Amino acid sequence: MAAAARRRDRRQTDRRHRPMNDDLTAPIEAWAGELLSKLAAPNRRALLLKIARELRKRQSARIAAQKNPDGSAYDPRKRKRGRRKAGARASVGRIKRQAMFAKLRTAKWLKVEVTDGGLAVGFEGRVAQIAAVHQEGQRAPVDPHGPTYRYPRRVLLGFTDADHAFIRDMLVEHINS
């Protein structure tokens, strides 16, 4: 009975929406908030835009390298089961060998938003739903009316130690200049 309750709790936890990387942004917000509040609004927005664009480049490069923020590699795609078809469709596997999220990492989908209160780098709309499934390792349908599959956790957006250092250096450089 206890095992069934644990499985049920785990499923309910998976269904809840959790903000991506809330625990990672808290230390940055604590000390950067005071520094940014001392800047004039146009200077603050310009600095935040510069930081956001560079963070988007870094996230995009990390996604292209198929790496999680901790440096580990993404789980590979699942092998397709079944027998191989003969003829023109026999050359399968090219897509499976290519890097995942090739289009998601482009500026068209990986958006930057800057306000007076802060910055955001992320996805919008349907792309955000797809990214969240991989980010959190959720269960989702493979095709619109097809079977569901629990996707492995592949952290698309997150801060590395180098990102923390970059933000700190940019703030210090801007205030010193």
Image (tube, rainbow, N blue to C red):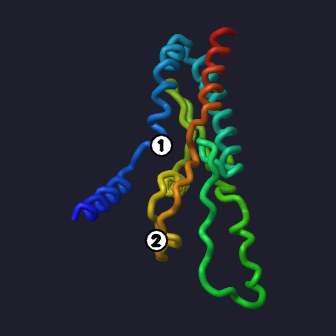
Left or right placement of residue 131 versus residue 56 in this view: left
Which residue is depicted at the point 44% across and 63% down? 139
Which residue is depicted at the point 52% across and 73% down? 143
Q: Taking 39 as reference, is 1 above or below it?
A: below
Residue at image mark 1: 20
Residue at the limit of the structure toward the front, as seen here: 2
Which residue is depicted at the point 29% across and 61% down? 8
Quarter of the picture containing the C terminus is: top right
Left or right placement of residue 12 versus residue 43 in this view: left
Three-letter code, disc 1: Met
Which residue is depicted at the point 43% across and 42% down? 19
Residue 147: horizontal and vertical position, in percent?
A: 47, 75
Residue at the limit of the structure toward the top, as seen here: 176
Residue at the limit of the structure toward the bottom, as seen here: 86
Looking at the rendered structure, the secondary structure element under dot 2 is strand
Q: Taking 23 as reference, is 97 above or below it?
A: below
Q: Taking 80 as reference, is 71 above or below it?
A: above
Residue 45: horizontal and vertical position, in percent?
A: 59, 23
Residue 55: horizontal and vertical position, in percent?
A: 64, 35
- Nearer-the-camera pick, 67 or 39: 67
Residue 113: horizontal and vertical position, in percent?
A: 56, 36
- Nearer-the-camera pick, 79 or 172: 79
Three-letter code, disc 2: Thr
Looking at the rendered structure, the secondary structure element under dot 1 is loop
- Nearer-the-camera pick, 44 or 17: 17
- Nearer-the-camera pick, 176 or 1: 1
- Mark 2 or mark 1: which comes first in sequence? 1
Disc number for residue 44? none
Disc number for residue 148? 2
